[in-house]
Amino acid sequence: MKETNLLKIKDHKKFMRELDLSKKRNFENNMKFVVFHAEWLKRVSNKEWSKRRRQLVDSLYKSNRKLKLKKVKA
């Protein structure tokens, strides 16, 4: 029988189990963050929320300008 790069059946089952667990942990962590953020939004004033949102957007624009590629002359 030819050697292949595919995982052996036993390894494949273990890999799939670990992948499922990883997906569940990621989902749970994402949901915890969403709940945490929603609670923060409930506690913070609109003025504070707007200030922080503006800071985030401004920093994204600033970093985008730094990362833009320069035109190359042909």
Image (cartoon, rainbow, N blue to C red):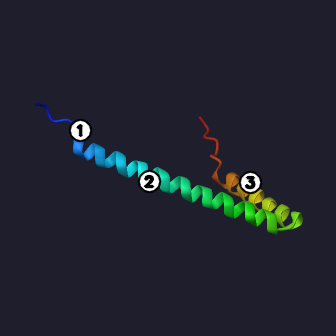
Under mark 1, the amino acid is Asn
Which residue carries the number 1 mark? 5
Numbered circle sitting on residue 22 = 2
Depth check, mark 3 against mark 1: the one in front is: 1
Q: Nearer the viewer, residue 19 or 56?
A: 19
Q: Residue at x 88, y 63 (%)?
A: 46
Query: The residue tagged with tag 1: helix, strand or loop?
Result: loop
| Mark 1 crowdedness (10 Å alpha carbons): few <14, some 14-19, many ≥20 | few
| Mark 3 crowdedness (10 Å alpha carbons): few <14, some 14-19, many ≥20 | few
Residue 9 in the figure: left or right of residue 43: left
The x and y percentages for residue 35 are: 68, 60
Query: The residue tagged with tag 3: helix, strand or loop?
Result: helix
| Mark 2 crowdedness (10 Å alpha carbons): few <14, some 14-19, many ≥20 | few
Q: Compared to 67, does 50 lie above or below?
A: below
Q: Compared to 35, does 4 lie above or below?
A: above
The x and y percentages for residue 6 are: 25, 38
Under mark 3, the amino acid is Tyr
Q: Residue at x 82, y 63 (%)?
A: 49
The x and y percentages for residue 11 are: 25, 46
Under mark 2, the amino acid is Ser
Q: Disc 1 to disc 2, how far (Cα)?
A: 23 Å
Residue 63 in the figure: left or right of residue 74: right
